[in-house]
Amino acid sequence: MAAIARWCLRHRLVTVLIWLLALGGTAAAAGAAGTAFSNDYEVPGTESAKAHALLREGFPGQGGDTDTIVWRAPDHRTVRTPEIQQRMTRALDAVAALPGVASVAGPYAPGPAGAAQISPDGRTAYAVVTFDRPADSVPKAQAKAVLDTARNPATQTDGLQVELGGRAIGLTEAPSAHLAEVIGVGIAAVVLFLAFGSLAASLLPIATALVSVGSAYFGITLLGHAMPVADFAPMLGTLVGLGVGIDYALFIVTRHRKGLARGLTVEEAAANAVATTGRAVVFAGATVCIALLGMLVLRLNFLDGVAIAASLTVVLTVVASVTLLPALLSYIGMRALSRRERRKLAAEGPRPQPPTGFAARWSAFVERHPKLLGLVAALVMAVLALPTLSLHLGTSDQGNNPAASTTRKAYDLLADSFGPGTNGPLSVVARLDGAGDRVAFERLTEALRTTEGVASAGPAVFNRSGDTAVLTVVPDSAPQSRATSELVDTLRRDVIPRSAHGSTMDAHVGGVTAGYDDFAEVIVGKLPLFVGVVIALGCVLLLLAFRSIGIPLKAAAMNVAAVASSFGVVVAIFQWGWGSEPLGLGSAGPIEPFLPVIMVSVLFGLSMDYQVFLVSRMYEEWLETGDNRRAVRVGLAETSRVINSAAVIMISVFLAFVLSGDRLIAMFGIALAAAVALDAFVLRTLLVPALMHMLGGANWWIPAWLDRRLPRISIEPPERSAPRATLPSQRPEADHAEPARTPR
């Protein structure tokens, strides 16, 4: 690591230019290639996937996104009032003529199909707009044109309300400016300036993170052309990358500033910072990537792209921290220190800087009361984790959007006027072979209409060859309701097998709710394996680094606690709706089925970061003195301030993404912010040191036979040239409470 740092310092201009070329090159390539993201949650082999496959095969070319235009007449008038009918007919004709629109099916067409699109009270109607491509491929400009044409001022007069819903229309509500990133970076810059007192030093972590995350953002866009990548992957990568990127740079700059204060030259301090803390950064980044890539064991294409995209961002932030950052440090020279620190250094010369102030007092306080504080911390984590027990995985749809959005209003109008199931109908698709199967399908149609929980079913639609039929089933409950999921199970388990008895009819239930239920079932089934793999790999890394059985086991327990408690916060806000509407996050609803997997990966990785930086300093002191009490006290006192500063930065960046306007990204932001807050301020600075004080020398125990067989690695080797700081003990005998051990 030191050799890499020295090369970057000697060739600082080349290093900076390489990174700027990487950023510019990926940006240009991504701009030329365009986006190709995919939100395909389909899992091959599931019932919904089979239904979709039958539908594609029997009705080719009908894969365009379908959206809705909903209008409601003012009081004492109906949608069949001549003036309203003429006005809306003109609007629908104008929409049908727009580029990218394949068809518009309105309620004023003759026949029963049109009449079914008018509510029983006659005041609400809707039209179905079919685009010529899936929602992921619909340009935002085309969706915006449909929205503007349908809601033009000439249409919305005399109290007529016109709203639009659907996935393509939802694209128009996504914020165009990166407001969340700007606010998060701005808060991080303020925290860094308060921590360093130097404007130049506070800007370097920001610059490093922006260059690396920007390169990763455009790289993820290009990755979407090579494999399926979800459309939220760039935002997720930005969220994680800004948090860890600024934090990693913060740790290195902090070590660099300590070197300057000890009298090292700028080049020596930068090289030493990368050789010591830089190694810890690489190790921490590796744990994050391992946790993220653990998603690959699930073998789900949708999550594979997310895992690789997020890992790419973390890798680039780590590389930038150990290459670009030292080059930039050499440019600012001694300005990495504040003016007051430079004057003091010039007047007094280099001298040891023992931890003082609140950090030292808190470390001593934890040493005096480990049992009480450990109990309080455990109770806090347990109470926050309780809501996780009611976690409900499912599809959060446009009914969970903010109340002021047009998609939410369209959703509510359809639910109120036509029933909640109108927003998420199920599709029963059947393969028919002969007259016997047709008779079975007719039995199925009649059975569906009398099934409890079904509001309406049919009529059946056959393809040209007559070998495939599809039946639309409208539940009497909302798409995200547990009752709708239970209806899907009833249809698959009882209704379809009973109707198909004695025939060869092959029928499957599809639709949005069915697809999400299948996806969630696969995720839940594989989640124990996934969590086990992530925990095992993390424990192996910590075992190699700290040569202890207790440290990895405590880290695994702390990580599980952080994940459970952060999910409790997410459930309370998003599923129970505690404050979701005031925060602009929409109404209460289920948690996305893929969120637990992604969050477990990210949270395990981020939790390991603080574990590595805290325990590595304790381990260094333990190797020197063999005194567990002193090792814990010194490690906490010397690292708590930088860990807390890093946590405040991460929390600020993550919470800023609540302003993104995207419910899913807001879930990520709140979950990550809660996890980091609990990890830094409850676990790492309270529960972990309390437990380590109570366990004493057992923290560092490892069987001799295992110690001999493990390869020896060092995360952050001690600086031999550094004078040892003296941290006063809380009691005179404190540093001699345990017999010294021989360093390994």
Image (cartoon, helix red, strand yellow):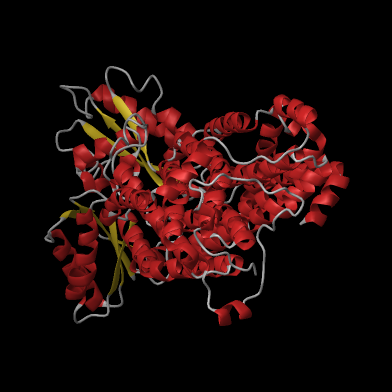
Viewer can see residue 300: no
Query: Is the N terminus in the top left, top right, bottom left or bottom right quadrant?
Result: bottom right
Between 304 and 60, the residue placed more toward the observer is: 304
Where's residue 155, x and y in %? 35, 23
Where's residue 67, x and y in %? 38, 43
Instruction: Give left or right: position of 381 versus 610.
Output: left
Residue found at x 44% / y 28%? 148
Q: Work out whether 109 lies above or below 221.
A: above
Q: Work out whether 439 lies above or below 7.
A: below
Between 611 and 134, the residue placed more toward the observer is: 611
Query: Is the C terminus in the top left, top right, bottom left or bottom right quadrant?
Result: bottom right
Instruction: Give left or right: position of 526 versus 458.
Output: right
Q: How many marks?
A: 0
Residue found at x 67% / y 57%? 716
Residue sitting farthest toward the top: 158
Q: Quadrant of residue 625?
A: bottom right
Between 49 and 282, the residue placed more toward the observer is: 282
Instruction: Give left or right: position of 189 versus 375.
Output: right
